[in-house]
Amino acid sequence: MKWADLVLMEKLGEGKAGEVWMAHNHDERTCGVHPRIAVKRYKPWILNESGQADRIFRELQAGRSIDHPNLVKTIEVVLDEAGRPNLVMQYCEGETLERHLNGLNYSIDFGELLELAEGLARALQCLHHHGIWHRDVKPANIVIDNHKPILMDLGVVKPNDFPEQTTTDQFLGTIRYAAPEMLFGDEYDQRVDIYSMGLVLYELVYRAKYLAEVTNWAQLVVRKSNQRNFERFPFGEWPRVFAEKNGLAATDCFVHVLKRLLADQEARVSDVSWVVRTMESRIWEKTFFIENGEFVIGEPTFPLRVDSDKITHIALSTGAEMFLKKINSRQRRIIKTALEKYYSRTHHEAAIYNWELSRDDFVALSKLEPYFRVYFVEADGETLFLDESLLLLYRYGYLQ
């Protein structure tokens, strides 16, 4: 393939490193298979950076050696009339996920979310199997082609073979999605891709760009440093809205997946195959609980408070039967109404502020002590926690 064989037709996108064009291919050897192709044209500052030519050819090598339906296929490197390298790739129909997220009428149903999560996980599974880390997983590098995600821009490093050459300018485009250990100069591995995938999925369900209000790169680094633990991530109302549409099991499942993907490096999932197995198992359609970070089929035990210092665990159904005998209709109504509104935030954020319960309602609940610790209030008197036993009874349908 020669540069003269390519006719650039439409600019598909532009980033800090270059532009991507759709082109017609008139090369006799390849036009039958690839009548339309994508051409990545690099900006001069990229080509002037030390080692960039090697990276372009590594991207070509990676794309040629790996054949996967969720990964873009690279074809070859073509020199233009000025002798500058251009990467020729498979042309994918559809728009980037970034454009979908930025659309005014953006929405995604649970089935589409699962399809995207599994496709992206399979793409990374293939790369990691070949010893390759993508390092730039973000919505702008994912094209949705006939509902199928395709991971683009294989600007990759094979960690044991190539030195690092990342500069501050090159890194600006990925700070928002970069794993903390990569940002702060720590040693890192394939888990940086898993973290970035987690952020992409987080944005899909949160329906907004992560830290969208922060545009300065230094401030973004500081904010990301303060949120190195997923428990600090902003949730807002999306778990409740998600649960109303998809059920409590699906919500608990997906939030747990996000927790495993966005955890600190040591606690993070180390093998993206875990996500693939979770998607394949359709665990959210079964009765499950979470123990030591893993999904377990069945119901959890019920933590029965024997006295103020001792808890014994019994079958959840037995605990439910005991609990329901202890409460009257008013107490049951109060608990069910509160949990219908606040379960997702209570369960996933631990604390709820400004509960809309009257003093009489609180008094009614307090009469359940000491049999069950229904709630407790922090010293400031403003933060109310519901006890785990109530969350379990509601989650597994015993308060219906």
Image (cartoon, rainbow, N blue to C red):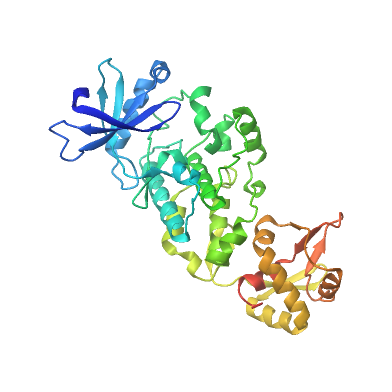
The answer to whether residue 49 is above or below residue 385 is: above
Q: Is any part of residue 327 visible from this angle? A: no
Quadrant in the rendering for residue 31: top left
Residue 153 locus on image (x, y percent): 38, 35
User: What residue appears at the point 49 percent right and 51 percent down from the top-left corner?
Assistant: 105
Specify whether 122 is left or right of 5.
right
User: What residue appears at the point 43 percent right and 63 percent down from the top-left corner?
Assistant: 281
Residue 348 locus on image (x, y percent): 65, 57
Quadrant in the rendering for residue 249: bottom right
Q: Is any part of residue 174 visible from this angle? A: yes
User: What residue appears at the point 60 percent right and 58 percent down from the top-left corner?
Assistant: 239
Specify whether 26 is left or right of 311.
left
Quadrant holding the N terminus: top left
Specify whether 118 is left or right of 238.
left
The answer to whether residue 137 is above or below residue 344 is: above
Asked whether 251 or 61 is in front, the reply is 251
Residue 154 locus on image (x, y percent): 37, 35
